[in-house]
Amino acid sequence: MTSATKTADVGAPARPGTAAGGGALAGTGTLVRFALRRDRVRLPVWILALLLGTLSTANSYAELYGTPEDRANAVETMGSPAGLAMSGPRHYLDDYTSGAMLGHQMLGFTAVLVGLMSVLVITRHTRAEEETGRAELLRSTVVGRHAHLAAALSVAALANLVLGLLLALGLGGLGVDGVDAGGSLLYGAAHAAAGLVFAGVAAVTAQLTAHARGATGTALAVIGAAYVLRAAGDSGENGALSWLSPIGWAQRTYVYVDDDWWPLLLCFALAAGCAATGFALSTRRDVGAGIRPQKPGRPVASPALGTPLGLALRLHRGMLAGFGAGLFLMGAMYGSILGQAEDMLKDIDQLQEALERIGGTGIAEAFASMVMVVVAVVAAVYVVMAALRARAEETAGRAEPLLATGLSRGRWAGSHLAVAMGGGTLALLVAGLGFGIAGAASTGDGALAPRLVGAALAYAPALWVTVGVAAVLFGWLPRASAAAWIVPVYAFVVGYLGQILRFPGWMNNLSPFGHVPRLPAADLNWTPLLVLTLVAAGLVWLGLAGLRRRDLETK
Amino acid sequence: MTKAISVSGLHKSFGPTRALDGLDLAVEAGEVHGFLGPNGAGKSTTIRVLLGLLRADSGAAQVLGMDPWARAVELHRRLAYVPGDVELWPNLTGGEAIDLLARLRGGLDVRRRAELIERFGLDPTKKGRAYSKGNRQKVAIVAALASDAELLLLDEPTAGLDPLMEVVFQDVIGEAKAAGRTVLLSSHILAQVEKLADRVSIVRRGRIVQSGTLGELRHLTRTTIEAETERPATGLDALPGVHDVRTGDGRVHFAVDGGEVDGAVRKLTEFGIRSLVSHPPTLEELMLRHYDDALPAADRHGTGGERDARGAGGSDGAARGGVR
C-alpha cells in the first residue's frame, strides 16, 4: 500500500534521458510515471480493498471454525459438487485449516477480482487512450511504438507485485493457526501470477478491437471462461478441465496444504506469452485501429426500430441480457445449496435467529425467503440503471433529435420506464426459475419450483415502485435523478442486514421491498402488492407530468 | 405570403444568464432565412423554443400556425431539425439512426434517402461511435432532408463538414427551396448564409439587431481588398466608402463598403494591377464595426472555428470580390 502511494507520488517530472533514448520503448518510463499519477487513487483503493477483504476473511475463518467439529462440518458442506464448484479442488479438504479454507474458498474468487483489476488497468492505458485520440497526441512526441503497452504492463505488474507482497506480509503477520509465513508468500505470489496472466490477456484483446469496451469485454469473457472451466473441473470426477484454467493453476498450488510453487510457472509462462503476442500484434495494426476489421452493421433499420419501444429495447437489451444471465446463475447457485441449507446454517447462530424470526415451516424455506431479498435488490439495481437510461440519453444530447420528431416526451420516457419495469419483472422470473429448478433438484421436492418462482415474482410491484421513484426524480428534479439509487441501497441495508441487526419495524416499512410478503416462508397477501402497484402507477404518472412541464436539458 | 415562423418578444433565462432578451423573428413560407449571430447569441435557444424543447419565459411564438410548446408533436410531424452538435447512439449504425429519426417523424422517401447518402458520401453501415463529427452531421442532414417536411430548422448544420460537402449541402438546400420548403438556417458564417439565404436576421445577445434582404444589408458589409500594383496606388482615400488605406512595398490594403467596390477597383486599375485578393466581410467584423461589440470573452473561443470556416470559403469569396 505505502509503496504504491510512494511510487505514485513521484509524478510528472521526467528525466530528459528517458524519452530521448530511441527505439520502440522510448518514453516508457515517463508513461509509467504518468499512468501511476493518473491511477494514484484507483490502484491503492483496489489493492487495499483486496488486502483487507482477504485479511478479514482469514480472521473470520479462524473464529467461525475454531474447533475440529466445526471444520469437519465445513468439509461436509464444501465437499458437495455445488460447494466444490463455488470454491476449489477437493484436495484442500484433506486438511481443512483456516489457511486451506483461504486457498479453497477465497483464492479463486479474489483471483477473478485481481484479474479484473489488471484488465481494467491495461485497457485504460492502451485502448481507451487510443480511442480518445490522446495516444495519438503522445505518439507524435518522442514515444516509441511499444511504449504505451509496455508502460501499461509495467503498471499492472507493479500493482500485482505490491498486492502479492502485502498479502504475504499481512497474512504472515496475522498469527492465525494454519496460516504460516511460507504459505502466505505463495498465497500472495499466486495472486500476482493470476493478475499477470489476465494483464497479458488484456494486452492481446486490446489489439483486437478498436474500442475499449470491446477489449475489456473480451478479456472479462476470458476470465469468466477460466472460472467456469475450473468450476466444472473441480466439481466433476476428473479435474482435467481445471488444468485449462489459469485460476485452476493458482488453486493447484494447494497453498497452506502442500505449498507447491511450480503451477505458478505455468501462469508466468502464459503471461509472458500473451504479452509477447500483444506486442507482436500491435506492430501489425495502425494506431487507433483493431486487428479485427470493424464489422459493417445494417445499412437500414429493421422494422422493430421504428417505434420508441423498439429503440428502448434495442438500447437496453445488452444490459438486460447481462443482468438476466447473472440473476439466473445466482438463483441456480443458491438453489443448488438449498438442500444443504440446514446443515450450513445451523452453525451460524445469528443467521439462525434471523431465519427463525422470518418463520415458515422449514429452515430451507426461511433461507429461500432471505435469498429472495438479495435477488430483489440485484434486480432493483438493474431497474434503477434502466430507468435512469432516459436521463443519460437526455444529458448525452441524444433525446433532442428524437423529441424534435413526432415523438412525444411521454412516449419517449414511457418506453424507457416500460422496459425497466418489464425487464425487472423478467429478471425476477429468470432468477426465480434458476432458484426454483436448482432448488427443487437439490431438495428433491419438485413442488418447490413453482413456489420459488412465485416468491421471486412477488417482488415485481416493489421494483415498479422503484421505477416510479426514478421517474418522479427524472421528471421534477432531473439533476438529482441519481438519488434513485437510495431505494436499492436502503432495501439492501434494511431487508438483508436488518434481519440480522434487528432494525425497528418502521425502518422496514419505509422501503417498498419491506411490504412484500416474504414468500415462500410467509403466506401470500395480495393487498400490499396491489397497493404497491397503484403507488407505482401514480409515481410514473407524476414523473411524466413533470417531464412534460420542464425544459429539456440540452448540451 | 404566410408566415412560417413568427416570434415576438421572446425571453428566456437560464439562471442568471439571459439567453433571449425580447427576440422577434419573422420567416415567410417558402424562403430560406439566414439566422446569423456569434456563438452564444441565442440562436440555438431560439430554435429549441421553436421546437417546443424549451419553454419561453415570456413572449409569443407561432410555427406553421401552431404554438410549439402546446402542440409540439403535431408540429414536429411537419418539420425536420438538424442540431448543431449531433449525438448518435454508439451501437446503432448511421443507416439505422436515419431510419429511426425519419420513421418517428412519419416516414421517409427511400429513393431520396439513397440518393442523399450517395451524394454526401456517407457509409451507413458504420456504428455511431465510429463516426467523425462531420459524418454524424451528415446522418442528421440525410435524415432531415429525406423526409418531406415543409419546414427545415437547421442549427449550424455544416459544422464539421469539409468544403466539398458544404457545396453538396448548398445544392441540396437549393433544391429544398425550389421544392417550396421553408428553411431557417442558423450560422455564424456570413459568407455561407449569403450564398443561400433570401433574407437574413442578425441576432446579438438574445435580440435581433438587423433583419432584411441581403441587398438591404449590403451597406453593412465591407469587403477587404489587398492588391499589388505596378505603380504606387494613390488617391484611394478620397473615394467614397473606402476606409483604412495602408500602402507600402508596392502593395495597397483597404476596406470598402458593399456598394462601392466597383469604384474602388476601377481606380485601382489605373495603377496596373498585378494581383488582387479580396476577403468577404465576416460576421465578426460586422459586429465589431456596427455594434461596437467587444465580443464577450465566451464568444472569443468560437472565433477559432469561425476563422477556419472563413478560410475554407475564402477563395470563393475572393473570386466573387474580383468580379464585382
Image: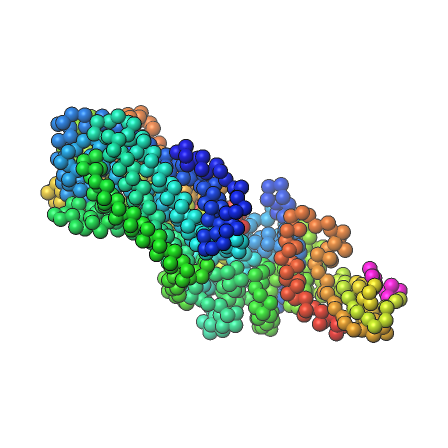
Q: Residue at (37%, 44%) from the top-left corner?
A: A157
Span highlighted in magenta in the image:
B236-247
| The furthest residue to the left | A444
Which quarter shows the N terminus of chain A? top left
Q: Is residue B81 above or below residue A16?
A: below
Magenta span contains residue B163: no
Q: Is residue A180 above or below residue A202?
A: above
Magenta span contains residue B239: yes
x then y, percent, for residue A328: 24, 47
> Is residue B233 at least partly visible in the picture?
yes
x then y, percent, for residue A131: 46, 55
x then y, percent, for residue B80: 53, 62
Q: Residue at (83%, 63%) from the top-left corner?
A: B248
Q: Is residue A307 above or below residue A469?
A: below
> Is residue A130 at least partly visible in the picture?
no
Q: Residue at (21%, 37%) from the top-left corner?
A: A259
Residue B167: quarter of image = bottom right
Q: Nearer the viewer, residue A85 or B93?
A: A85
Residue B100: quarter of image = bottom left
x then y, percent, for residue A115: 32, 45
